[in-house]
Image: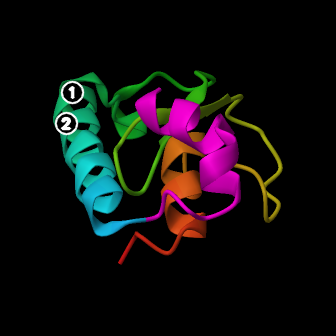
Amino acid sequence: MIMKELIDRKEVNDMTLATEKDKAFTLAELSRRKIENTPKVIDNRSLYAGSDMYFYCDYCKALTDQLPEDYIPDPDTPKKICDECQSLKDLGWME
């Protein structure tokens, strides 16, 4: 949630906080979240028929969506990037 707090601050919205120091800090937080979230990933193939499907952020592997097995995909469903990583991507910090 640290990146979310930074993004909510006016300085980030004005793009004055987007420095190399802040980039290094937030990318370190991304690495920490990725390590933290890795063991929690549920393999949808191992679930019983009819179980909800779990979808994770492409960058940090945090849970982004839990949808019924018969969901109808569209461009926004399932969510592919969590809010914190989307904020980093919007700042141009995700390669």
The residue located at (34%, 35%) in the rendering is 43
Question: Is the residue 75 above or below the residue 92 in the image?
Answer: above
Disc sitting over residue 26 in the figure:
none
Q: Are marks 2 and 1 in contact (CB under 8 Å)?
A: yes
Kindly tell me whether residue 79 is visible in this rendering.
no
Left or right of 77 in this view: 47: left
What coloring was used for the rendering?
A: rainbow
Q: Main secondary structure of the magenta part?
A: helix
Q: Give, as a three-letter code, the residue at label 1.
A: Glu
Q: Could you tell me the amino acid type at mark 2?
A: Arg
Q: Nearer the viewer, residue 77 or 71?
A: 77
**Badge 2 density bin: few <14, some 14–19, many ≥20, Cα 10 Å:** few
- Secondary structure under the numbered disc 2 in the rendered image: helix
In the rendered image, which residue does mark 2 sit on?
32
Near-viewer residue (74 or 89) = 89
Write down the region rendered in magenta: 1-18
Q: Residues within 10 Å of mark 1 (few under 14, many from 20)?
A: few
Q: Quadrant of residue 66?
A: top right
Left or right: 84 with respect to 32?
Answer: right
Horizontal side of 17 relative to 77 (left or right) equals left
Give the residue drawn at x 58%, y 54%.
87
- Count of numbered badges drawn on the protein: 2
Residue under circle 1? 36
